[in-house]
Image: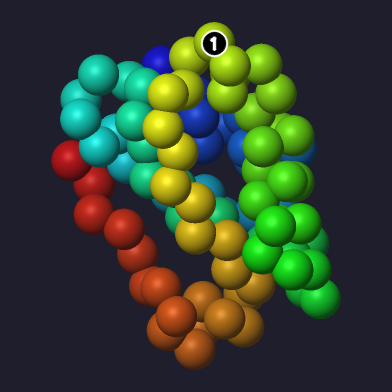
Amino acid sequence: MDTNTLERTITAALPSATVEATDLNGGGDHFQVLVVSDRFEELRLVQRHRLVYDALGDLMRARIHALTLSTLTPAEHRDGLITTIGRS
């Protein structure tokens, strides 16, 4: 899997989200993903991650071996909790 496919899959489920994915090992199965969405307002971390996992569906079982998520609201992102992740 490539980062563009991963980003499009998440954005399809969370249309207002900004998604930035990095392939951590070049093998297409270990990713770090930053998702910024107003849908995360007032949700706990586990609820935010569940939204992303639900968006990925079977990809989590079939094609993604490891996933590191950063899930932020737009305000949290503006406040600099995480500004970006490095692209490989």
How dense is the environment of label 1, judged by Cα within 10 Å: few (below 14), some, or many (20 and up)? few
Residue type, numbered disc 1: Ala
- Identify the residue at image location x=51%, y=76%: 77
Q: Work out whether 33 lies above or below 26.
A: below
Percent across and percent down for residue 29 are 36, 22
- Identify the residue at image location x=20%, y=25%: 26
56 lies left or right of 1: right
- Identify the residue at image location x=43%, y=47%: 68
- The residue singled out by tag 1 in the image is 62
Query: From where the camera sits, is residue 25 visible?
Result: yes
SS at badge 1: helix
Percent across and percent down for residue 21 are 40, 43
Percent across and percent down for residue 27 are 25, 19
In front here: 13 or 48?
A: 48
- Identify the residue at image location x=58%, y=61%: 71
In front here: 15 or 40?
A: 40
43 lies left or right of 27: right
